[in-house]
Structures are given as structure tokens and as C-alpha cells.
Amino acid sequence: MAAQHNSPRTLFDKIWDDHVVRTDEHGTVLLYIDRQLVHEVTSPQAFEGLRLAGRKPRRPEANLAVPDHNVPTSDRHLGIVDPISRLQVETLEANCREFGIQLFDMGDPRQGIVHVIGPEQGFTQPGMTLVCGDSHTSTHGAFGALAFGVGTSEVEHVLATQCLLQRKPKSMLVQVEGALGRGVTAKDIVLAIIGEIGTAGGTGHVIEYAGEAIQALSMEGRMTVCNMTIEAGARAGLIGIDEQTIDYLRDRPRSPKGEAFEQAAAYWRSLNTDPGAEYDRVVRIDAASIRPQVTWGTSPEMVVPIDSEVPDPDAVADPVKAGSYRHALTYMGLKPLTPIAEIGIDKVFIGSCTNGRIEDLRAAAEVAKGRRVAESVKLAMVVPGSGLVKEQAEAEGLDQIFIDAGFEWREPGCSMCLAMNADRLEPGERCASTSNRNFEGRQGQGGRTHLVSPAMAAAAAVAGRFVDVREF
Amino acid sequence: MMKAFETFRGVVMPLDRANVDTDAIIPKQFLKSIQRTGFGPNLFDEWRYLDHGEPGQDCSNRPLNPDFVLNDPRYAKAEILLTRHNFGCGSSREHAPWALDGQGFRVLIAPSFADIFRQNAIKNGLLPIVLDEQTVDALFALAGGVTALEIEVDLVTQQLRPSGGEPIAFEIDAFHRHCLLNGLDDIGLTLERADEIAAYEQRRQQQAPWLFASPASV
């Protein structure tokens, strides 16, 4: 930290440099980790590892835990019916008690998806390193924090040492120039980026998003973009710190207070990328060219604008890619060249760490207001990202708009993004989903997922098929 | 303690798909387990079996998908998985390498791996080897024969020696190689640096005291 840096540095360089404990002869860095978020699925074996080795967390207060993947989104007073899910959540509770880690349990109004509550509590702050045993930890990069997902061995490593062994990734700048058109959202930006660079496009890199269209996004929108960075193959996404970032954090429960906040804010402002700093790779995207996006296949890169068709594998030159396309079309039950707007849906899921925040629910409610979910749609559900998002939405009357339109209004959690709880697709069912992954079986074995923005999902619920929200 | 990686000769199973994600490697219902072992029978569950799998089930009586490569008798004892680019994309679930390990795989060969998966694999003593597309294509051609391809994997010399073929050199991060060859527990290694970590914390606290304020006092 005392080192002098004369050449211009990126935001990523600055955060990295401020967290290097030591560098070994192989160039591997012992990187200090400021914060860890913990959930029930990827932590039990880490706590067990600590116990077996007789180790304790180095800084219990640097961790915050919450159950989110397994929690039911209805009839919560009945508890968790599935005994295996229940044991996993109870194990988290017992581990947090034993190791002195703060937990928002299922009955806590602050409970929610780990990536929604971190920022909400001010637990996530600019310039920090933050990890979680969850790939969507990239979400927190919206605050100019270096945040990435780790496996269970690394969860244990951070608990025990507050550090990780890392090699510095490369850097990539994704510059989104100009302004978005009406009805086009943060979700469409990130899906368009993934469509452009591919799901391995960011492998080995940390992506910084910049440009007018990114600056113009709300903090919620920035979180959506950073959230799906992992779907572009990069472990972490970052966005520069501005007054909006700082204002969001003012008065949050875990934010610094008073003089300490101003001191922190001054440091945060100093972290932005210096003029002239270089990236290993630069990608430029014109915001005005982005249309509402819909995925058609089983990888997030299989995405097209709403006003186009399902692609034809015969027109794809690369044999491996053509094979993937054919496989995806068979799984998805789609024929080449079908217009996206002719694809009918069975279910709608609005929620997840990608799109379960208040702004997302407002966007969906605006479309749903005064309309009805189509008869052909078996289930349309809205799952707020956290208890506090739910409270806020109810204070604004959004719950009633959804209920009046025929949507189900649920309790917070990961829900049908990955279907670890009871919310899932049946084989062959087709879903318009605001989540982040359209992998085979992701929302239930045999289920067919199409990723869209919250407004597009609400419009699809009403129409019973995909429609262009700009003309809705 | 991770087991040390020793030179061995093993059968190669070709999985000719790109972007194999962690949901395919081990579906979410099996993530409810609080154990680190027992995931092998559920590796590629939705591709491998014709029925729906649930945790705690006896998999030995489940109907197998005859079209899935893992059920091909030629590859019954495979220890090397050959696949296409971006293997292990998706979630950070370490259950993916746990399932591969549980099934008996020790080496993975592909043109690229997803970052978190690769890290998790190494932490569990699995060796992910990146080779260029052409070499991978050539190995696929060899691996699809009537008799399964065998490769000798030598991490010391960083060489693959396919039966009846030319040796192939591979690259690996020096630190990862060191950890794999010696079966090192890297938490133990890091804890040996406790003084340096404490010194860092002291310096950092001067610069950014709010990072060290306890939750009750903020």
C-alpha cells in the first residue's frame, strides 16, 4: 500500500494493489479479503473443514450469513418441508452460532438473496474485496468492489485466513456508448454483451463496464449488469464509483457513519480508473443498437433481439457451435427461424439476484398494471429479492398490482432461478424468466428457460408469448 | 489434506460438447447435501439416467441412458475426461469437482475451462489441462475408436503420452503444479503467513479504519 504508483491505473489495479499481502516466487498473490457473504449451500463443508482442523474464523465479523437457496417462498410459517433442505438451513444456523457469525434467519425481515442483502445492508462497499461461495458475487462490483465467487474450499480458506491465493486476472473494458432506447434495460445490455463476446468471452479477466449508458443506470441496473458478468465468463465485473454509489450507501446499517463515512467516501472517489490507464482488451457497444433481448437456447450467449428469429444451425460454419445449436433447439423444442414473438410460454418467474430488486419490480408492475395474466399461462410468480424489497414494494402497492393482474406474490429467496426449493418447472414447460441462467434443467429437469428483463417477462405473462415491450 | 498427484496411465472418455455447465455436471438437488463426498453416482445425472434423480436414492437400479458416453462400457474405468471449450461454466459449486472425483476422474482436458471451476478442480487434486483446439480435435479422433484411448499423464515433465501417439506438452501455473504434486493444504500454507497478514491488517487499518469497525460500533 505504501508503494508509489506513477503509471495510470484502472479501478481494478488500485483495489488489487491495496489488498496484496505478499507475492510469492511463482507470482501468486496472497490477497486480503475484506468481506465474505455466506449461504447454506456452499458453506457446510467449509465449516466442517474448520472443525476437523481445529481452526476458527480469523474475523467472524467480516462475514454475514443468510439462507436463500432452499427457503420456501410460500407458507413460510410451516417451515421447510423437505427434510434435506431443512437440515442444510439448520446446519447454517448451527455453524453461525458456533463460529460467531451474524445470520439473518428465515424469519428475519432482512432475510433475502445474499447478493441483494449485501448492498442493502451497506455490507458491500467500494474498494473492498468481497467473496461468497456463489458465482453471482460479481453483482457487488456495481459498487466498485472487487467481488467474485469462490468454491467451498476457498470459503473455508477465507474463514480461516481472511485471504485467498490468487493470480492477478487480466482486465477488460466494456464501453457502452450512447443512450438506451425506450423499453431497453440493464438486463438487455448485459444479455447483448454476452451475445457479443460469448459465455467464455471474459474468461481470465475482470470486466470494467463504463460509458454513458452504464453511468446512466441506477444502482439496481448496475447490479444487474455486474451480476451476469459471470455468464460472460469473467469472475468479476466492476463499475466506477460516482455520487450515486456514495448516496446509495449513506445511512445503510453497515455503512460507516458520520466523519468516517466522509473519510471513506474520499478514499472511494480516489479509486476510479485514471485517464490513460490501459486494459488488456476493450470492447465497445453502441447502446442505441440494443433491443430487448430474449434467449432462445441453453446458454446465455444464445440470445437474440425480440424482433428476430431463432437461428438456423445449418447457417453456422463452426461444427462444434452448430452441434451446440442443434442440441439446444432439440432441448428447447424450437424450430429454426421461428419468430421469437411466436413462442408461447407456460410460466413466468420475476425475481432472482439478477432482477429481484425494487426497480425491477416497479418495471414489471408498470407493465402488469391494469392487465391480466393470459389464460394460457399456468403460473406467473413474483419473488422479491429480500424481505426489505418486499416491504418497500408493498408500501408502494406493487404487490396489489401484481395480485390484481393474476401474479402470485411470494416470500423472498432464490426460488425458481435454480429450483432448489419447491418452485420449479415441470418437464417441457417453457418459462419467461428474469433470472441469469438458461442451462438445461436449471429451473427444473426438462424445463425450458428464456431469459428476459422484468418488463419483458411481465409483458410475456400478459400476452402468453414473447412480445416487444416497446410496442406493448 | 489433498492427495498428491502421481503419474498414471488412464482411459479417456470423450464428451463432445462445448460449454458443459455445472448444472449439467451436478444438478442442484444434490447440492442439498452437507457432505463433501457421495456425489459420484450423480455426476451428469440428467444425461446419464432416464429418470429423475433425487438425493439419497440408490442409483444402481436406475434406468441408464444408453446414448450417454459415460454409460459406454469402453469408458467404464475412465479417469481422463476429454471435452470442449468452457467446461465447468456457471455456478461456483465445488460439488462439480467433487462429483467428477467421486466418479473416478483425475484429469480433465479441454481447450478452456471456466475460471471458478478450474480453481475448484485444482483444490481437489484434479488436474485441468488446456490444449489448443487442434490438439483436442486430434485427441477426439483417437478417443472415439473401438478400443478406448489411454493416455499417460505426467505432471512432473508436463507431458501427455497417448498410447501409440506422440507426446503432447502442456502448460500449468507453477504454483498449481507445486500444490498438486505435493498434495499441499493451502490453508495450512497461508496460516504460516499469519504475521504478514496481521501486519497487512495493521497498515490497512491506518488507511481505511472503517473496514475494521465492528458491526455494533458502526
Image (cartoon, rainbow, N blue to C red):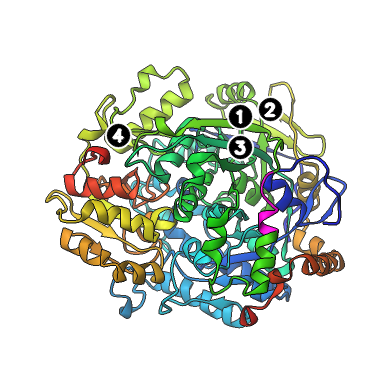
Q: Which residues are magenta?
A: A267-273
* Circle 1 SS class: loop
In the picture, the disc for residue A173 is 3
Q: Which residue is mark 1?
A: B149
Q: Point out the image quarter for the N terminus of chain B.
A: bottom right
Q: Point out the image quarter for the C terminus of chain B.
A: bottom right
- Compared to residue A67, the image places residue A311 above or below, namely above
Query: Considering depth in this image, is B38 or A340 the residue closer to the camera?
Result: A340
Whether pointer 2 and pointer 4 mark residues with C-beta atoms closer than 8 Å, the reply is: no
Q: Position of residue A182 (x, y in %)?
A: 33, 40
Q: Position of residue A200 (x, y in %)?
A: 55, 36
* Circle 3 SS class: strand
The amino acid type of the residue labelled 1 equals Leu
Same chain letter for marks 2 and 4 = no
Which chain does the residue under circle 2 lie in? B
- Label 2 or label 3, whichever lies nearer to me, is 3
Q: Residues within 10 Å of mark 1 (few under 14, many from 20)?
A: many
Q: Position of residue B76 (x, y in %)?
A: 53, 41
- Label 4 or label 3, whichever lies nearer to me, is 3
- Compared to residue A146, the image places residue B65 above or below, namely above
- Marks 4/3: CA–CA distance: 27 Å
- Label 4 or label 1, whichever lies nearer to me, is 4
The numbered mark, 1 or 2, whose residue comes first in the sequence reads: 1
The amino acid type of the residue labelled 3 equals Leu
Whether pointer 2 and pointer 3 mark residues with C-beta atoms closer than 8 Å, the reply is: no
Whether pointer 1 and pointer 2 mark residues with C-beta atoms closer than 8 Å, the reply is: yes
In the picture, the disc for residue B162 is 2
Q: Which residue is mark 4?
A: A306
